[in-house]
Image (cartoon, rainbow, N blue to C red):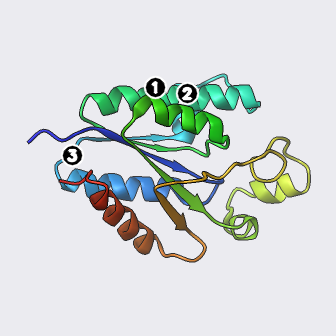
Amino acid sequence: MEHKGFTIWFTGLSGAGKSTLANLIAEDLRARGMKVEVLDGDVVRTNLSKGLGFSKEDRDTNIRRIGWVCEVLSRNGVVAIAAAISPYREVRDEVRSKIGDFVEIYVEAPIDVLAARDVKGLYKKALAGEIKNFTGVSDPYEPPLNPEIVCNSATETVEQSRAKIMSRLAELGYLV
């Protein structure tokens, strides 16, 4: 049976758990025989968006590129999973409107929790003013207003979030 393509878009601050959840959901969907491609923000930046900086314009361009790839994959029967900070609501909504079959997942956690789990020490540097334009500290992050799913990685285990996402995908009619 041919599966319908759609896009799952994980948004949230650095270190919230977007990539972890994206990869687990990809595993679950593949186990159901679905074709899945994960577009991780960090990986995309080194390939598809090499050369872009972190200005608002460059961030928007990066998200539009990820969105375009998701759109192409989705229309060809693939489940495209994007895991990217995607800080600006307007460009996320623009991508949603182009794709149509779009499930937005907001992975939230408070800054103090993110800073405590940050192995690279980026939050510490950003909070000390050593990193400019750091999303959530010195650059804005606009949480989605009506995401299909909200996972709080400070209060939920990875398995609880995973189960919540799979259950909601079933409710929305995306699982076969």
Whether label 3 touches label 1, CB < 8 Å: no
Q: Nearer the viewer, residue 40 or 170?
A: 170
Which residue position holds label 1?
68
Query: Quadrant of residue 159 in the image?
Result: bottom left
Whether label 2 touches label 3, CB < 8 Å: no
| Residue 34 numbered mark, or none | 3
Regarding mark 2 in the picture, which secondary structure is present there?
Answer: helix
Regarding mark 3 in the picture, which secondary structure is present there?
Answer: loop
Q: Is residue 158 left or right of residue 84?
A: left
**Label 3: how many Cα within 10 Å (few below 14, some 14–19, many 20+):** many
**Alpha-carbon span between mark 1 and mark 2:** 6 Å
Tell me if residue 114 can be seen. yes
Who comes first in sequence, dot 2 or dot 3? 3
Whether label 1 touches label 2, CB < 8 Å: yes
Q: Amino acid at mark 1?
A: Trp
State which quarter of the image contains the N terminus: top left
Which residue position holds label 2?
64
Q: Amino acid at mark 3?
A: Met
